[in-house]
Image (tube, coloured by chain):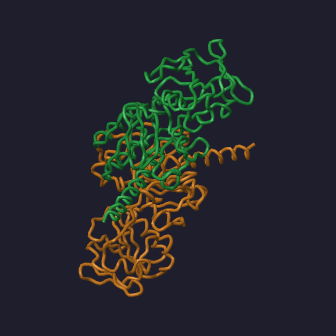
Chain colours: A green, B orange
Amino acid sequence: MRDVIVIGKGPAGITAAVYMKRAGLDVMVVGKGYGALEKSEKIENYYGFENPISGTELIEKGINQAKNLGIEVLADEVIGISQNDGFAVKATTETYKSKALLLATGKTRTTVNIKGFEKLKGKGISFCAVCDGFFYRDKKLAVIGNGEYAAEELSELLRHTKDITLFTNGLPLKTRNIPSNITIVYEPVSEILGEDSVTGIISDGKQYDIDGIFVAIGTASAIDFAIKMGVILDGTDIKVDNNYMTNIEGLYAAGDAIGGFLQISKAVSDGAHASKSIIKNLKHNESKELIKEE
Amino acid sequence: MRDVIVIGKGPAGITAAVYMKRAGLDVMVVGKGYGALEKSEKIENYYGFENPISGTELIEKGINQAKNLGIEVLADEVIGISQNDGFAVKATTETYKSKALLLATGKTRTTVNIKGFEKLKGKGISFCAVCDGFFYRDKKLAVIGNGEYAAEELSELLRHTKDITLFTNGLPLKTRNIPSNITIVYEPVSEILGEDSVTGIISDGKQYDIDGIFVAIGTASAIDFAIKMGVILDGTDIKVDNNYMTNIEGLYAAGDAIGGFLQISKAVSDGAHASKSIIKNLKHNESKELIKEE
């Protein structure tokens, strides 16, 4: 079991990892995309760069910085997290375990531009199979998505019902892990039907009777994971205390995911502060264990 | 009158200046030394640098970053600050005026390794001529220092007494602004005498009768200025509110000067946050002025 896994390889995650590695902790960073910075072509206001730098370039420099210090930075998608004597982080290739976990995956929250979506969000449209799948026993479900995250949600929902249709919403399928008994609709979803709750989906002019929709587009965000683990949110921000810890012992969050000023400057500061708490906490627990063992 | 003057050209000061310049404010940065970072040979934990960078190199990159955005970065020593319809920042060459002022000069606080110093600090040993000069009317005073800051303190003290000796404490004089009627002792100060309060100084085996000592070694720090302006401190940290403003309207502080985690990551975050408040404040006041003018 590692000491810490950091999910997210942007400014907050890498900064925290660097501090923790230097403090002697066994730390791994895992993440897929480059987050919000990927879209920044020209960053002028992050201290220390004489000339503007692109977000992609900065993220890559950060990853190399971590690797140069001997930190393992895994380019993989996290598709699930669970807690049970530490944390288990399920990536597409393997499941990794750690004593503490830092969510630093930025603020991207899946939104969907489909007619009826805003109206029915929370009324039959869910973002969390683990949280809400139970309410749809033997109902007709739709999953909107096309990648590993969607596959993960599907396999969770299959525990509750067999009648599930996957809508890729016009995108190509990016996973081979869709169970064979699932119907896949590749055409764009044009409308979600329903008055007080979801009753159907229209795609390519055809109407599908649906009782519930699970959105799992793209890569899961920190908030998706947080919701699944019962983390308390403040609006769309993960709520942390002064030590950057969520309401779950050992689960920390930093960077855009916790809200505030969405700037690299603030993210690196978050990362440094969160690492300080994690280091203190793990070293403290270590000494407690040592005492117990005596 | 400029919008903002930033004192200090380290991570906090430059970051704030960059944000403010990009927000359209007329901002100038002034500072002499490179602060605590000057001593860092190898920085590994500041995000975005693949390979370790020296403090000097980082500071220089920051200064160039600011200059590339058209910010005036003045390499001059600030020897005094006053408030009167905005702020007046007295550098060795000129006095500059601004609506708002940001103190970002790090945490260096002058300490003196002289026998008797710790015992008599605050009991006849002062750090602020403007604050305490008044109490020494026609007394025998000593100033310990050798640069512009010492010269500034001397000229302030001359308003209260003519009997002042300058002790350079073994260092060469680094200013031509010492009034000609001042006695200068170049030998190291070996002891400060006194029981309940300062009574004398021993230097090179000779004893000098002294009623009060003003320490003005090296360059004045943010805290030196803060004390002079009546800024509330929290120990050795400048106390700021959530908007990074001190108890004086328009006077802000950021970086190591306000305490907390003394790291570059935190300093750049401070700088970004302080700039946000200053921008908001100045733009708000601007619109109030516009309304008044109508």
Please identify the residue farthest to the left as the structure is shown. Answer: B205
Question: Which percent across, then down, holds residue B22?
Answer: 52, 38
Q: Is residue B204 visible?
A: yes
Residue at 54 percent of width and 59 percent of height: B240
Please identify the residue farthest to the bottom as the structure is shown. Answer: B195
Question: Which percent across, then down, holds residue B249?
Answer: 60, 58
Residue at 48 percent of width and 55 percent of height: A243
Q: Give the image quarter of residue B256.
A: bottom left
In the displayed structure, would residue B234 be above or below residue A1? below
Left or right placement of residue B251 versus residue A207 in this view: left
Q: Nearer the viewer, residue A248 or A70?
A: A248
Q: Nearer the viewer, residue B38 or B68?
A: B38
Please identify the residue farthest to the top as the structure is shown. Answer: A205
Question: Which percent across, then down, holds residue B283?
Answer: 63, 44
In the displayed structure, would residue A182 be above or below residue B278? above
Left or right placement of residue A179 versus residue B184 in this view: right
In the displayed structure, would residue B99 be above or below residue B197? above
Question: Which percent across, then down, holds residue B100?
Answer: 56, 52
Residue at 37 percent of width and 62 percent of height: A288
Q: Give the image quarter of residue B158.
A: bottom left
Left or right placement of residue B33 versus residue B224 in this view: left
In the displayed structure, would residue B111 be above or below residue B105? below
Q: Is residue B63 visible?
A: no
Quadrant (top left/top right/bottom left/bottom right) for the C terminus of chain A:
bottom left
* Picture mark count: 0
